[in-house]
Image (spheres, rainbow, N blue to C red):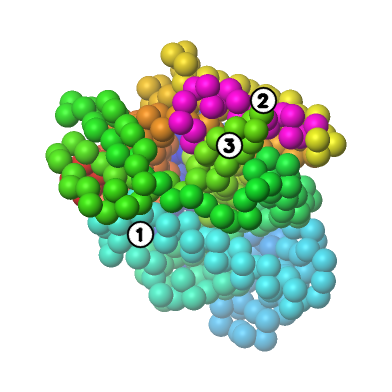
Amino acid sequence: MSVLDQESIFTSMLQDGPFAIGDLPPVNHPFSRETKEWVRDISFNPLLKTKYRAVRNQIFDFLGISSFDEVFDLIHRPDVRNDCVWRVHKLLGNMFGIHGGDREICRYLKDYARTADNVINFLRFKVLQSYASHIEMTNEIETTTDPVDLLLIIFNERFHKKARFEAKRKLQLMNLAGSIDQRERETQVEAKFSRFLDFLNDYVWSPSLKIGDLEISYLHSRHDQEDFTCTDVKIIAEEEAKSLVLEPGEKLTLIKRRGFSDNEVEIPIYVSIRKKPPSAQVLKLLRKNQQDPAVAVDDELGLMAVLNSIGDVKRFMKHLTQSAVRAGSFMTLEDISDTLTGGSYTSITTGSSTKTPMLKFFARLGGMRVEFIIHTNKSYLNYIYQRDVSHEEYEIKRIFDTGVAEFLFPKDIYHLNMEEIRRRQIQRCRKRIEED
């Protein structure tokens, strides 16, 4: 189910649904033509009526009111609003399992607001970089961090339609950020990430190397003119790379490699270790049309490795499981998919390509479940550069094809044609990859 579907769990955010932000706040002019049309539309859909009642009751419970008329007291009377804020903070602290007083709860809420802003700013400065000025947040919304203030803005006619939509959007993103933070505290992700790094340094990487001691190398590659696949690659040293003059269709890619020992043979390996930040997890929840991070986000800990050959890949996997045993934990490899050796699979992830060669699995060890993505030099270069395969293209496609771009920046507010923007952004991406 798409995040834009009327049965989406994020129905309250849709601008073509019963909770759309209009030119006027929802509690004004109850007998207007727009309100009558809204009532007529919702009366024929039992699901929407149920969702409306649920959202309305949540607002009343949140603000401690029994009718929308009481919202104006909260907007115009600071003393009433301050009492409401203190009460709401306590309720949210209990809901998200935050232990401490109001100051501690405020700190967490500000973190959630920062995560919500980071979601929008990530899209502004990366996926939608060429349209950053079009989707820039209203200043007053970006600087507001309290959920009560954001909710009241939705009902405040002094604020423009765009600002009121952005207040509602920020509230939704903050709620997802809170759910993610709660799960990370419950599952102790930070502690597990630290233990994972210790495991790699103590048992996996070569003991002859100091932690952080990396060998600088370059991949000099040639690429096909049709789809920019890697046709040939060789490893060169830093000195040779400095004097190299690239021809059209050639790329020079820096890799800083560690090493591991297998039967006293040192095998170089490039490693990128990842802990998925909260903003990326929020976007994944939206793409998956989920509110529960335990269901949708299973890859917050991950490692990508690049080796010289298929043989080295097999050596690394054996070394990895044996290292886990030396560390006192059995390691199982789950959800294995292997397209490095010529196999194929059908991707169920919107925007991804079935042509992407890689070895992917989850390793369960020491109370952790870590995602591993393994490449050879050639498949890694295809992962970066190949048309319809490169990760940079994938990031663009999945934001548009899952409906997240339209969801966060609806056309009636931002006046953007997302289909045209998708095409242009992919063109710019390809130009940057192939010509820079």
Residue holding disc 1: 125
Residue holding disc 3: 266
Query: What x and y, as percent, mark residue 32?
Result: 40, 58
Mark toward the start of the polypeptide (3 vs 2)? 3
**The one of 351 and 376 positioned closer to us in this rendering:** 376
Q: Main secondary structure of the magenta part?
A: helix
For the residue marked with disc 3, what is the amino acid? Glu
Query: Of discs 2 and 1, which sits in the foreground?
Result: 2
Mark toward the start of the polypeptide (2 vs 1)? 1
Residue 6 visible somewhere in the drawing: no
Bounds of the magenta span? 306-325
For the residue marked with disc 1, what is the amino acid? Phe
Residue holding disc 2: 318
Please give left or right for residue 181 compared with residue 433 in the image.
Answer: right
Indicate the quadrant where residue 397 lies: top left
Q: Check contact, mark 3 vs mark 2: CB within 8 A.
A: no
Q: Is residue 240 above or below residue 79?
A: above
For the residue marked with disc 2, what is the amino acid? Lys
Please tell me how crowded label 2 is: few (under 14), some (14-19), or many (20+) other residues with Cα within 10 Å: few
